[in-house]
């Protein structure tokens, strides 16, 4: 029995997509960041910081998307989605898991400043400008480094699932067309049947009300 605790378009989408790539059967419990459902005691007992994803997997409870993705890859090694310890791409894969969260933290802070904060807690235009520049630098560096069809030379992997999730949110803050190699790569990923099955179960996002959130004037 596998249950994913999920918010549409949140980092739990990484886990959902990975489970589709592996071919697992799972149930989904849906939450919203906006409606208080993530503050109920039952959920907080599973997730110490009240965040998604949480995965209940055969009687165990796992949180943190990177850890869950790694645990799933190790539990189902036949899927071949993560290089084994000692293999050539292992270091690159683990670096990318953490790099994905470097990008994730920038996006989370942009979300806080430009989506969730409301007056009188005015967001700082200078902080937004800085976060946006750091996000563009992190994506630009990957645009320069991307040389093959996927991030690892061994082919499609969990590193692609972890990292490319950032595009789902970055598109609200950055003109992604300035990264043509990354966008061709993302198009390749989004054509995968596993991704399409995950998006069909993702649900309607209620995080963003606008299609794009520019850096405020005067920053
Ligand atoms: N490092 C954690 C971050 C989890 C996280 O912050 N999830 C967000 C959604 S993407 C969340 O649950 N936010 C709810 C909140 O901040 O109240 C992971 O990768 O799982």
Image (cartoon, rainbow, N blue to C red):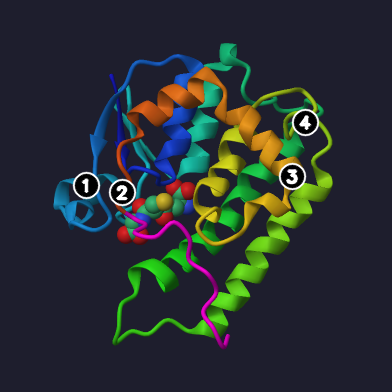
Q: Mark 4 points at which residue?
A: 89
Q: In this view, does 116 lie above or below 34?
A: below
Rendered location of residue 129, percent (x, y): 59, 77
Q: How many residues crowd around disc 4 within 10 Å: few (fewer than 14), some, or many (20 or more)?
A: some
Residue 60: x percent and y percent? 33, 30
Q: Name the residue under label 3.
A: 180
- Please state the extent of the stretch shown in magenta in the rendering: 207-219
Badge 4 element: loop
Residue in front for this viewpoint, 198 or 3: 198
Distance from the alpha carbon under mark 1 to that under mark 3: 40 Å
Image quadrant in which the N terminus is located: top left
Q: Within 8 Å: ligand 1 and the Cβ of disc 4?
A: no
Is the residue under label 1 in contact with that under label 2 (CB below 8 Å)?
Answer: yes
In the image, is the residue at mark 2 within 8 Å of ligand 1 by its beta carbon? yes
Outermost residue to the top: 78
First along the sequence among labels 1 and 3: 1
Q: Name the residue under label 1.
A: 43
Mark 3 and mark 1 in contact (Cβ < 8 Å)? no
Residue 23 located left or right of residue 147: left
Residues at circles 1 and 4 in contact by the CB criterion of under 8 Å: no
Q: Which of marks 2 and 3 is nearer the N terminus?
A: 2
Name the residue: 82% across, 28% down.
88
Query: What secondary structure predominates along the stretch shown in magenta?
Result: loop
Could you classify mark 3 by the number of other residues whose Cα lies within 10 Å: few (under 14), some (14-19), or many (20 or more)? few
């Amino acid at each position: 029995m596998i249950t994913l605790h999920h918010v549409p378009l949140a980092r739990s989408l990484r886990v959902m997509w990975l489970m589709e790539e592996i071919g697992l059967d799972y149930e989904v419990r849906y939450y919203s960041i906006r409606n208080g459902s993530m503050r109920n005691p039952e959920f907080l007992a599973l997730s110490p910081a009240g965040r998604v994803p949480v995965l209940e997997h055969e009687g165990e409870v796992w949180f943190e998307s990177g850890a869950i993705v790694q645990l799933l890859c190790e539990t189902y090694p036949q899927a071949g989605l993560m290089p084994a310890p000692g293999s050539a791409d292992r270091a690159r894969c683990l670096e990318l898991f953490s790099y994905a969260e470097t990008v994730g933290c920038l996006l989370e802070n942009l979300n806080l400043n430009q989506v969730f904060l409301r007056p009188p807690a005015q967001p700082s235009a200078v902080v937004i400008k800085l976060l946006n520049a750091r996000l563009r630098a992190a994506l630009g560096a990957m645009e320069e480094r991307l040389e093959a069809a996927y991030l690892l030379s061994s082919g499609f992997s969990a590193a692609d699932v972890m990292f490319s999730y950032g595009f789902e949110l970055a598109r609200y803050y950055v003109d992604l067309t300035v990264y043509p190699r990354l966008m061709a790569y993302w198009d390749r990923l989004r054509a995968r049947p596993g991704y399409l099955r995950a998006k069909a179960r993702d649900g309607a996002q209620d995080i963003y009300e606008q299609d794009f959130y520019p850096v405020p004037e005067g920053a």
